[in-house]
Amino acid sequence: MADTHQKNHDYHIIAPSPWPFLSSVGAFVLAIGGIAYMRYLNAGELHLFGINFVTPWLFFIGIAIILYCMYGWWSDTIREGKEGHHTRVVSIHLRYGMIMFIASEVMFFVAWFWAFFDASLFPNEVHQVMRAEFTGGQWPPKGMEVLDPLHLPLYNTVILLLSGTTLTWAHHALLHNDRKGLVTGLAFTVVLGVLFSFVQAYEYIHAPFAFKDSVYGATFFMATGFHGFHVLVGTIFLAVCLIRSIRGDFTPKNHFGLEAAAWYWHFVDVVWLFLFFSIYVWGSWGAPIAVH
């Protein structure tokens, strides 16, 4: 009888899980909560089913549900891997999933680059009269002071390139079963990620323009801000990998969690290089540099 229940395939049939449903609920609450929060900030109303949902708490409840689901779902995935369920076929599917996720992120940033280049390449387009008023028919907009691309932006570029190097060092150390090199490389990468976020926060605080000032400010902060958010997520991702490395969870043959974090981080590196050269360098060319 025991042989009839023996697994004779490479696929993993997971047990019934609450996480997909709870994640959907959390995403729905977060979406409605985001709208309600914005209405709350503008002293508006949001009536659904005869109830006024204007409150900031709904937004934070949605975030809490999603964070709880992320922790629970990924904990189950880690446990399944330790139990040997991540066979060759399952591992391939996990990699396909991460590749598709990064591909979707690429298209996400394409939208912000598209907005920036549309505004910068055609600032005086005839059928967009309002945009011509905001830009003065030139790019950067007339009278706009910009950030020095060879100051903090270049500093952050060096930081991210160094972080990619230390992460590659950590990965190769794991492949050679060098635990000390793995932990040290990941620790350096996390520190560099935190340093990048602090430098960008300082840059935002001292920026000579605001989000609402012009289309330049809007496209600048949307593109670089969402990249900064991805750096923050990637830093948390790598910090979790650092904790797991200290616990000894990764082996030279079984370390997809670290591999996925490395893919994500290198993607963040590449996006920043595009941001640096297109928005900071080319996009601000010819404009006066703000002096602090």
Image (cartoon, rainbow, N blue to C red):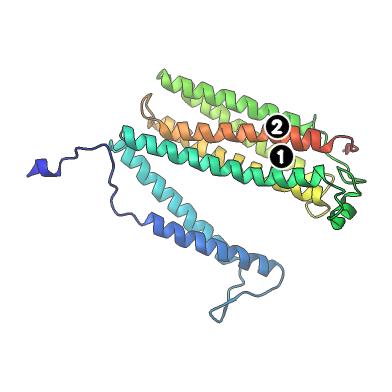
- On the image, the x and y values in percent for residue 149 come to 80, 32
Of the numbered discs 2 and 1, the one sitting upstream in the chain is 2
Q: Which residue is mark 2?
A: 156
Q: Which mark is residue 200?
A: 1
Amino acid residing under circle 2: Asn
Q: Is residue 1 left or right of residue 236?
A: left
The answer to the question of whether label 2 and label 1 lie on touching residues, with beta carbons closer than 8 A, is yes
Where residue 24 sits, quadrant-wise, is bottom left
> Which residue appears at 66% of the width and 39% of the height?
197
- On the image, the x and y values in percent for residue 107 come to 60, 44
Instruction: Indicate the quadrant containing the N terminus: top left, top right, bottom left or bottom right.
Output: top left
Label 2 to label 1: alpha-carbon separation: 8 Å
> Which residue appears at 31% of the width and 41% of the height?
80
Where residue 273 sits, quadrant-wise, is top right
Instruction: Indicate the quadrant containing the C terminus: top left, top right, bottom left or bottom right.
Output: top right
Kind of element beneath mark 2: helix
